[in-house]
Image (cartoon, grey):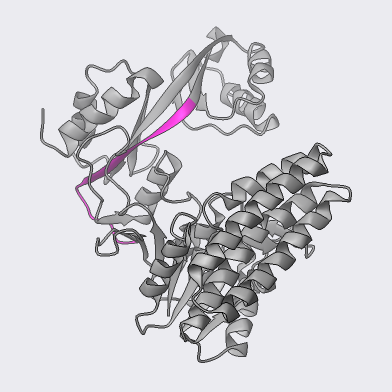
Amino acid sequence: MKVLKFGGTSVGSAQRIKNVAKLITNGEQKLVVLSAMAGTTNILVEISDYLYKKNPDGANEVINRLETQYRKHINELYSTETYKQKTSDALKAQFEFIRSYTKDLFTLFEEKVILAQGELMSTCMMTNYLQEQGVKVELLPALEFMRTDKNGEPDPVYIKEKLNAQLDLHPGADIYITQGFICRNAYGEIDNLQRGGSDYTASLIGAAIHTDEIQIWTDIDGMHNNDPRFVNHTEPVPRLQFEEAAELAYFGAKILHPTCIQPAKYANIPVRLLNTMDPSVSGTLISNDLVSDTIKAVAAKDNITAIKIKSGRMLLAYGFLRKVFEIFESYQTSIDMICTSEVGVSVTIDNTTHLNEIIDDLKKYGTVTVDKNMCIICVVGDLEWSNVGFEANALDAMRDIPVRMISFGGSNYNISFLVKEEDKKRALQSLSNHLFNNKI
């Protein structure tokens, strides 16, 4: 049994739900993970914002608008009055449930309950549509098996036990439908796996049932070798190793959530990225197998701030770096890149919430310089240091781009350049020309 995840865009309209239904009903047994319909989660966030601000009238207006939108989807999706009415009644109850929160105290707990409604509605609509088409389908409530522990991390033992128990309760179905993103926490409260969490759900489920393959269906035909929004003539990468895919996801490839592939990696389950809008495209296959001696792709991460701490006291002194890193740790601010010399250290961060406090504390140990509006360009592939010339090719592509920092050797899979955001597009195109398009 394969696990397939479809994102919000893939189920973003009645017609797209019908298209997904055709994709998943080809005779093979599947467990299908669905996100909320495109735009729904953002609207639920907006409703929550009104409730935080104690404006129930504003919240009700947005709720009414969303409900009207869903009524239109229902009329377009179902061909029989029976299933139109069945789905209308189910969704009406959910919207009434959301409205009940406009009358009471609103906290983070209530917000997470409201955010869960998008996935509950999309899976209800898909399940009813498949039933109308005569498909043997069962809805498996994610809140019955998806749980995080006291540290907010998924509990794989619990997930495996409870999910398999749910499958045992409903044997013989051709299609199983469940919700992505949503879960319960260690205290039984409704919670979620954060944005992009539907990918994580699919990976956790795949590991729990030892599936043959996990498929992530989006509106892009795989992970491209560069960002098609800024670079011409990009192509999907046919194969990636898990570490390579994680690097690309972390450094800007939005098609994949950075954490989602970890359960699949550890369970040695391949993950395939596919395009709902063009199912014929083979997409990208991610596995533990490395295609060696190849540079695979380039990605970029925006909104980076570089901080340089220069200190004569660092020369031959131990403990300096520990003091620097403890400052970032105290403000729960992670570091992306780091470069050191005998008298200084440069780091980059993407979270500037506590930038002023961090700078003030760093000034105790040296002179601090800050560069904002920077961008990390990440070149990913088999960059084992013994593969002579790969880093030289990347450096040659950047010869006309001012580079603030270079990071190489931290892993066997990437070399990163820190540049100004205004130079990002030029850098990406130059790297594509040198590395993939043979234009030097």
Does 313 sit left or right of 230 as displayed?
A: right
* Residue 381 in picture, x, y percent from top left: 28, 45
Q: Is residue 282 visible?
A: yes
* Residue 368 in picture, x, y percent from top left: 56, 10
Could you say which is closer to the camera, residue 436 or residue 309?
436
Where is the N terminus found, in terms of image quarters? Answer: bottom left
Above or below, comparing residue 48 to residue 430 in the picture: below
Residue drawn where x is 45% and y is 54% of the image: 9
Residue 302: in magenta span: yes
In the image as oriented, which residue stretches furthest toward the right? 104
In the image as oriented, which residue stretches furthest toward the front? 81
Where is the C terminus found, in terms of image quarters? Answer: top left
Could you say which is closer to the camera, residue 135 or residue 379?
135
Q: Which residues are magenta?
A: 288-303
* Residue 14 in picture, x, y percent from top left: 47, 63
Above or below, comparing residue 276 to residue 370 in the picture: below
Residue 91: in magenta span: no
Could you say which is closer to the camera, residue 365 or residue 241?
241
Q: What number of labels is visible?
A: 0
* Residue 361 in picture, x, y percent from top left: 68, 16
Q: Is residue 179 visible?
A: no
Residue drawn where x is 83% and y is 47% of the image: 106
Residue drawn where x is 50% and y is 56% of the image: 8
The image quadrant that residue 166 belongs to is bottom right
Residue drawn where x is 61% and y is 23% of the image: 324
